[in-house]
Each structure stands twice: as structure tokens, then as C-alpha cells.
Amino acid sequence: MVNLATLRIGCLLAGLLVLSACAGGGFRPPSDHPVKIGRPYVVRGVTLVPAADPTYDMLGYASWYGGESGNRTANGERFRPRWVTAAHKTLPLPTYVEVTALATGRRIVVRINDRGPFVPGPRIIDLSRGAAEQLGVRQDGHAAVRVRRIEPTEADRRRLLKGRPARELPPASDRALASLRAQLAAAGMSLSGADRAP
């Protein structure tokens, strides 16, 4: 027969287990391991196929999101709007990218931990509010950007995983910026974003 002391200890441990599950909300702590590529998925009739792309380097538009504080990101982490993170449709989670605002040349390092944006048009990345503020594009809502996959320094990884921005990068040179703007125009997109989808 089970004695009363053993029963009490068992109930206490079960109660603590339930409370610890509630307190954590089941969110995965921010981590770079494991890297999740994911299965193909369909959004609004379009099949998206996540894949590793070490040479990813694209021009398009960035938007930002931030009202979803506390929601779960696609890789299971808690969404924190002030952190420098982003959503991308197909890059592995997490992936680190350098985002350049083509209007100003400002560059930042961002950690991708979510999926999106899921709107038609040339939006290639959804920045968190913190990332949009650091890039200087929050007021505009949208911005023409270059998004390039990078391998950040270990110090920058640690900073981003703790919710702090990576080290400040020098702005893109005038020559590099002129070249990126010319490529954007050649692709039929404008710096002002007048051609972007809502």
C-alpha cells in the first residue's frame, strides 16, 4: 500500500510540473539549434518551399509587424516585438541576414525566426518593430531593401539571442547604394515603393 507521505510528495511533484508548464507557455527558448528548414506549405494557393540558400541576396520591400506580442513564431519562440528579428517565407529558421535600407544606406543584422510576409507583391521580409526602428523605416511602414544572408560573429549572435541589437554596421557606400538602386529600377521597382502591394 502507498503511504500518505509518498502520496503527498507525488501530488506535490505533479502540481509543480503542471505549474512549470503553464509558466513557460510551451515556448522554445531562443536558440540557433536545431536549424529548421520545414516542409513545403501553401498560403493563398501558392506553394512555398523552405530551403537552405547560403547565397541568398535579394532586392524588394520590407514591411514590419509588432502587435502580435507574445504569439509563437514559426520556430516556436515567443515573438518579442522589440527584438531585432524578422519573418521570411522560405529561409531556414533561424537564419541571419543583413538588411540594407536602399533610401538611406543604413544596414543592420537581423535574425529570422518566423514565416511571412504573406501578401502579394515584392515584399521579401517582415521586420519586427525593433528591427524596423533600428533600420529607420518604422515611420514609413515599408521600405525598399536589400536582404543578404550572412554568418554573423559569435558576439552578434549572442546579442541577438538575448534581445539586443548586433553591433552597428557602417552604412553602405554611395557607390554600392547607387548600384543597388539601379538594380531595383531595372527590376521594375521604385525606391519610393509606389509599385508595392498594399
Image: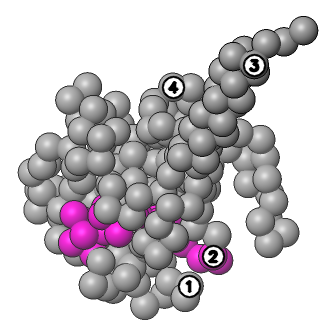
Which portion, as a residue range, is magenta?
119-137
Which amino acid type is shown beneath numbered disc 3? Leu
Q: Give residue 120's mark.
A: none
Cα separation between marks 3 and 4: 44 Å
Cα separation between marks 2 and 4: 29 Å
Mark closer to the chain start, 1 or 3: 3
Q: Is residue 90 above or below residue 92?
A: below
Which amino acid type is shown beneath numbered disc 4? His
- The answer, for residue 92, to whether it is visible in the render is no
Mark closer to the chain start, 4 or 1: 4
Cα separation between marks 1 and 3: 67 Å
Q: Which residue is mark 1?
A: 197
Mark closer to the chain start, 2 or 4: 4
- Structural crowding at the residue carrying mark 4, measured as other residues with C-alpha within 10 Å and reported as few (<14), some (14–19) or many (≥20): few
Q: Which residue is mark 4?
A: 33
The location of residue 172, given as percent across then percent down, is 16, 56
Q: Is residue 141 above or below residue 85?
A: below
Discs 4, 1 touching: Cβ within 8 Å:
no
Q: Which residue is mark 2?
A: 119
Whether 177 is among the magenta residues is no
Residue at position x 49%, y 87% from top?
Answer: 195
Task: Looking at the picture, tell me which residue is in the foreground, 86 or 179.
Answer: 86
Q: Is residue 198 above or below residue 47?
A: below
Mark closer to the chain start, 3 or 2: 3
Q: Of discs 4 and 1, which sits in the foreground? A: 4
SS under mark 3: helix
Which amino acid type is shown beneath numbered disc 2? Val
Q: Which residue is mark 3?
A: 4
Q: Of discs 2 and 1, which sits in the foreground? A: 2
Residue at position x 39%, y 41% from top?
Answer: 96
